[in-house]
Amino acid sequence: MSILKLNNVSLTYFSKNGETKALDNISLDIKEKEFVSIVGPSGCGKTTILSLISGLLKPTDGNIEINNNSSENMIGYMFQKDELFEWRTILDNIYLGLEIQKKLNNDSKEYVEGLLKKYGLWDFRNSHPSQISGGMRQRAALIRTLALQPKILLLDEAFSALDYQTRLNVCDDVYKILKEEGITSILVTHDISEAISMSDRIIVLTKRPATIKTIHNINLSHIDTPLKRRESNESKELFNTIWEELQ
Amino acid sequence: MKKSNNHSKEYNNYIKKEKFKKITILVIQILILVGFIGAWELLAMTGAIDTFITSSPSKIIETIGNIASTGELWLHISTTLYESILAFVIATGLGTMLAIILWWNKTLQKITEPFLVVLNSLPKIALGPMIIIWVGIGTKSIVMMAVLIMIIITTITMLNAYQNCENSKILLLRSYGANKFQVLTKLIIPNATCDFIGVLKVNVGLTWVGTIMGEYLNSRAGLGYLIVYGSQVFNLNLVMASTVILCFLAAIMYFIVAWFEKIMKKKYNQ
């Protein structure tokens, strides 16, 4: 079942120096619980797509359909940096979105407590961000987003600020959590292997103004973790194909 | 990290050395103070310096005792203290509020920018006579003087701090659907805590500059009044005594702010 549809979406930025066309006629159909990655040359407008889906930007042309049946918190957003507030404890950081949407009540607190316990942050709930490791911080940022129970999660280079070792672990971590919670995910990344290892589908964009160049369906579901998928032969072949396409 | 009593010998030596350094610094500081006061007193006693011009520690204490016995000491201290605390609170509060308003309204900020820059570079003491004519002599004009000295720099510093907030953090809040007021209270203000403490520290010094300067221009009581009065009748003992009291008061107020800083830093883990 389709949960999110982009119909012929175009976006033009306006500034003093003129107008820049960032996206040109993008159409996408994303199914429920699917993991889709978007790769493309740097500066091509990958992040713009996420801004459009989240509603932070409005398309100049075309429209976006979100299959909204119940919850109003359809979309969660994860950024490159964890953006945890140093003056708040981990628990208070996780409550941030709930506070803003005025949904901090016993039910939501209990839900957060469950997430923290399930994903190993309960003992650190009263720590400040600087007191825990980079991997744990990113996990805390993910739980902060999950606290609002989104159906779709947008990940904007969500792992690229981490060192390589941590990054591989966090990828496995986040992947597992997203699959367990049944969340549809859209990842924007410049790391082709990362995209291959996590996704069901990869969308390759052209240079600015971005259009869809190719779409790759990936069938690695027989290998259970992103880390192991990175080593498979299929993923190596696919890496080369996408690499060529991006040149 | 767990504390254990089985530290290596090298570690114990290191701790000892650090402690020794700390104590040495403290001892030297005390020695300088005691030496300075002692030398001053000694030179005054032997007549090597003219106490009519330089006064002396014993005479300063005597003078303080004299004013205290007439009951006037408290009047002067409380007058100046009241003025400087009032000015400190008004200027810090109003300046921060102005900064928030300017952060909120970009257009207003652009409009006022050149005026703020000019006002900031203007020596506020030049406004003294005008202030006296407008608000009259006494407490009002003294507090006004001190407020003017602090408020512009408070506004400029806090506005800068508010604007320095990372855009990505604002984006995060907006992705939760936060309105501007929520961005302000959840992010912009707590994010600028360090800068706010910095402003408090600067203002705690400036408020004394403002009130004493105000009292120089016009006053009937206060430590600034005592200093001016003392110099006019060439009573250097009175001038020195007032200055010493001022030193103590300024130090106490500074330590209160430093203590507040410690609490805030602990709370915000910075």
Image: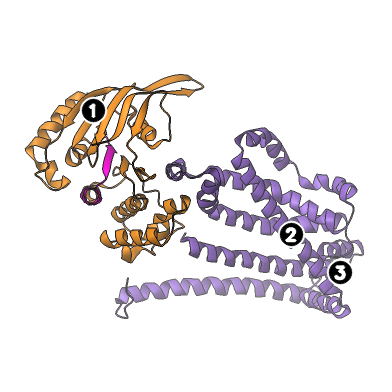
Q: CA distance from mark 3 to mark 2?
A: 27 Å
Indicate the quadrant where residue B217 lies: bottom right
Q: Amino acid at mark 2?
A: Trp
Q: Position of residue A182 (x, y in %)?
A: 24, 47
Q: Which chain is orange?
A: A
Query: Pointer 2 indicates a residue of which chain?
Result: B
Mark 3 lies on residue:
B52
Query: Pointer 1 indicates a residue of which chain?
Result: A
Closest to the camera, between mark 2 and mark 1, is 1
Could you tell whether A118 is left or right of B79 in the image?
left
Disc 1 is placed on an element classified as strand
Q: Position of residue B47 (x, y in %)?
A: 81, 74
Q: Which mark is residue B208?
A: 2
Q: Which residues are magenta?
A: A172-190
Mark 1 lies on residue:
A204
Is residue B56 visible in the rendered image? The answer is yes
Q: Nearer the viewer, residue B25 or A188?
A: A188
Disc 2 is placed on an element classified as helix
